[in-house]
Image (cartoon, rainbow, N blue to C red):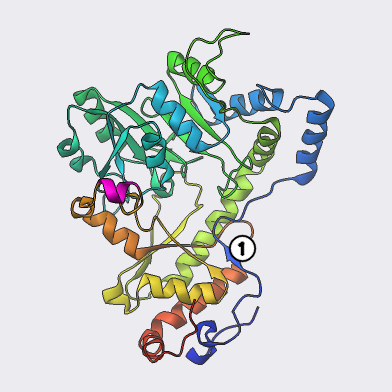
Amino acid sequence: MIMSKTSTKELAVFGGPPLFDETLHVGRPNIGDRKKFLRRVNDMFDQRRLSNNGPFMRELEQKLATFLGVKHCISMCNATVALEITARALGLQGEVILPSFTFVASAHALQWQEITPVFCDVDPVTHNIDPGKIENLITPRTTGILGVHVWGRACDVEALSAIARKRHLRLMFDAAHAFACTHQGQMIGGFGDAEVFSFHATKFFNTFEGGAVTTNNDELAARLRGMRNFGFAGLDNVVDIGTNGKMSEVSAAMGLTSLESLDAFISVNYENYLTYCSGIEGIPGVKLIEFTGNEKNNYQYVVMEIDENKAGLSRDLLVKLLHAENILARRYFYPGCHQMEPYRSYFPNARLLLPETERLTANVLQLPTGTAVGKSEIDQICDLIRFIFFNGQEIKASIAQGNSFHD
């Protein structure tokens, strides 16, 4: 790692040495206490229980349900399968309304079951689905709403619930970003008919691969448990259609170990977020998304919005410059589900109804954070970003002259 850039010629995109020798990733996995995890793995081998409702999985479900303040937590092999099973368990069919500003798995989980995703625009401030735009999208084929708690900031739960009740729709939430976050002081997990969490390796709380569904509905929970295990209800008794969505014991062991380090992970994320806020402050046209002080958040996402007209530099050019310096910032959720296949072909004019989504997918990027990134690295990243924006015209002129290397 070198200290700083003092001339645009030193930028890696123009042939200078990268700021960092090793790449800094968005979402590099957090690792808890390795010794505790390995003890659990040894116990797992001694018991010869690797899957199928093992003791670690049951313990994790109980602890997560208690932590989230819900009656039921049903662990799954991953969040995409959890979304698919939940949609089927809720009886969703026809059309379901959801934001396009989300990871494509939210839409794929519906389309995979031949449920048509109907994309709704988002609020420009919260980045969550805009309840005011939903009513106009409801048709006789609409059976549900899928809200997504983007960046761990809760959807307008009350407005969505009111629409669902009024129009007799099922309401579920994709809470992949929102583990350990609150809405009006209540842990996300108990809203709507069900909520789905992701515990993928890139999430701040991970089980290697994994996910969970939470609900306060006893009947729904029973159906979810059966459907994740091929529809079995007891030995040799299949009562419903199902699939294999079970979480393995080694994943549950990782989850229990991660849960023990949860506060430490969040503390690191929060300190990283504050460091970024201080380092980015004052750059024209550049801001970080804010978190409400009276709500809990996991601070996993350090998200920058760039107004090119004010900043003088586009988000995509910034990403190119950062990548050259081994800072793997990510465009989220570029280019939007509606611009991906098969939805791009199904709904070629969807962008006309999604102006805020289009704006965000062009302006937003996520910066490296987590336990693999420290204050010194973040200070370096912020110094570089300031240098880039305050020398933006010179950089663009050099690139226009063909001086940058090609990706």
99 and 230: which is toward the camera? 230
- Determine the image quadrant of residue 216: top left
Q: Considering the image in quadrants, where does the N terminus appear?
A: bottom right
Residue 321, x across and y down, in percent: 47, 77
Which image quadrant is residue 97 in?
top left
- Residue drawn at x 66%, y 75% as measured from the top left: 21
Magenta residues span 342-346
Secondary element type, mark 1: loop
Above or below, 389 against 45 in this view is below
Q: Is residue 129 magenta?
A: no
Left or right, 156 with respect to 7, comes to left
User: Does 38 sit left or right of 400 as displayed?
Assistant: right
Residue drawn at x 48%, y 37% as measured from the top left: 80
- Picture coordinates of residue 53 (x, y %)? 65, 21
**Chief secondary structure of the magenta portion:** helix
- Magenta highlight on residue 343: yes
The picture places residue 112, in percent across and down from the top left corner, at 40, 35
Pick the front one: 214 or 354: 354
Foreground: 181 or 12? 12
Residue extending farthest to the left is: 136
Answer yes or no: is residue 7 visible.
Answer: no
Residue indicated by mark 1: 373
| In the image, residue 12 above or below residue 138 | below
Q: Amino acid at mark 1?
A: Val
- The residue shown at (82%, 30%) is 45
